[in-house]
Amino acid sequence: QLYQFNFPLTSGNRYRVTFSARSSSGNDFKVDLLKHASPFTDYGLSNYLFNLSTSMATYSVEFTATNFTGTVNDARFRFWFAGTAQNGDTYWIDDVMLQNLGP
């Protein structure tokens, strides 16, 4: 999981998540953007499956920030491997970026 202190999300705005990744086996993973503390509410990106390969590639998805009002500063990315990774898999993730695309 990746927690970046104090990056603001505004409800109703569109965002784009972009990163580079690969896995040793080509197995996939899912990405969420969640509230950092309990109850870990998703903020508009929930269990999005990225189809990785064994070569480094760039991936992105756009979403609308939801499930809160106003602006929050308590989000984190979760890269979720359960259900897709196998014993011995290695994952590389780099250049994670969140862009605010506006309302």
Image (cartoon, grey):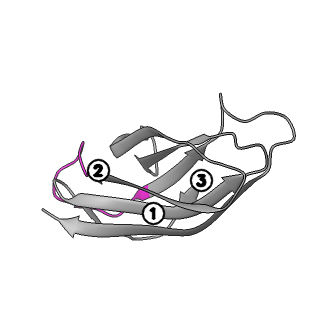
In contact (CB < 8 Å): disc 1 and disc 3: no
Amino acid carrying mark 1 in the image: Thr
Marker disc for residue 58: none
Measure the C-alpha gap from mark 3 to mark 2: 19 Å
Amino acid carrying mark 3 in the image: Gln
In the image, which is nearer the foreground, mark 1 or mark 3? 1
Dot 2 or dot 1: first in sequence order is 1
Residue 45 horizontal/vertical position (percent):
37, 45
Q: Which residue is mark 2?
A: 63
Q: Which SS class for mark 2?
A: strand
Nearer-the-camera pick, 35 or 102: 102
Marker disc for residue 18: 1
The residue at 66%/49% (across/down) is 53
Measure the C-alpha gap from mark 1 to mark 3: 15 Å
Quadrant for residue 94, please give it. Answer: bottom right
Left or right, residue 34 beside residue 100: right
Nearer-the-camera pick, 71 or 91: 91
In contact (CB < 8 Å): disc 2 and disc 1: no
Measure the C-alpha gap from mark 2 to mark 1: 12 Å
For label 3, count other residues whose C-alpha is less than 10 Å away and answer few (under 14), some (14-19) or many (20+). few
Residue 5 horizontal/vertical position (percent):
47, 70
Q: Which SS class for mark 3?
A: loop
Read off the magenta span.
64-75
The residue at 38%/70% (across/down) is 7
Residue with the most extreme left position = 103
The residue at 34%/64% (across/down) is 73
Residue 103 horizontal/vertical position (percent):
12, 62
Q: Which residue is mark 3?
A: 1
Dot 3 or dot 2: first in sequence order is 3
Amino acid carrying mark 2 in the image: Phe
When the figure is inspected, residue 32 is found, relative to residue 82, above or below; the finding is: below
